[in-house]
Image (cartoon, helix red, strand yellow):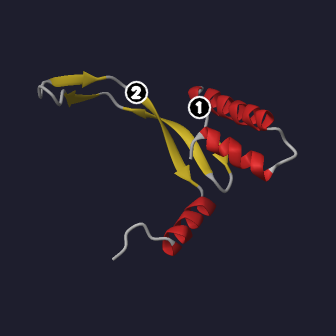
Amino acid sequence: MTKSQLIERISLKLPHLQQRDVEMAINITIDVMSHHLAQGERIEIRGFGGFSMIQRAARMGRNPKTGEPVSLPIRHAIHFKPGLDLRERVSLSRDRFPLIKD
């Protein structure tokens, strides 16, 4: 699902709100979450999951084209841990609609 699809679906569920207002709310939510993650804070949305910043250690990698060793610096990444409600919903939907058929 893309951001525009999310905006469209929320607008359909809340017809009393204009689409531009829903779009503004989504954009503000994403901006606030991005700002707090960039500050190293954790974000928890009960029933959905938590976002946190993790630090990946510096390491030696290799250039896949040449095989030459390359030093990779410390970097930060975002980690998402799904909440119990989300895990259960995903598990139930996969049981009802399996992706791989035997």
Q: Which residue, given by chain and number where applicable, does mark 2 sit on?
A: 75
When the figure is inspected, residue 10 is found, relative to residue 67, above or below; the finding is: below
- Looking at the rendering, which quadrant does residue 29 occupy? top right
Q: Residue shown at 60%/61% (left/top)?
A: 84
Q: Secondary structure at mark 2?
A: strand
Question: Between 29 and 42, which is closer to the camera in this rendering?
Answer: 29
The CA span between labels 1 and 2 is 14 Å
Q: Residue furthest bottom?
A: 102
Residue 76 location in percent, x, y? 44, 29
Instruction: Kindly identify which numbered label has been placed on residue 37.
Output: 1
Question: Between 90 and 59, which is closer to the camera in this rendering?
Answer: 90
Q: Residues within 10 Å of mark 2 (few under 14, many from 20)?
A: few
Which quarter shows the C terminus?
A: bottom left
Instruction: Kindly identify which numbered label has been placed on residue 6.
Output: none
Q: Residue shown at 55%/39% (left/top)?
A: 52
Q: Secondary structure at mark 1?
A: helix
Residue 58 location in percent, x, y? 31, 27
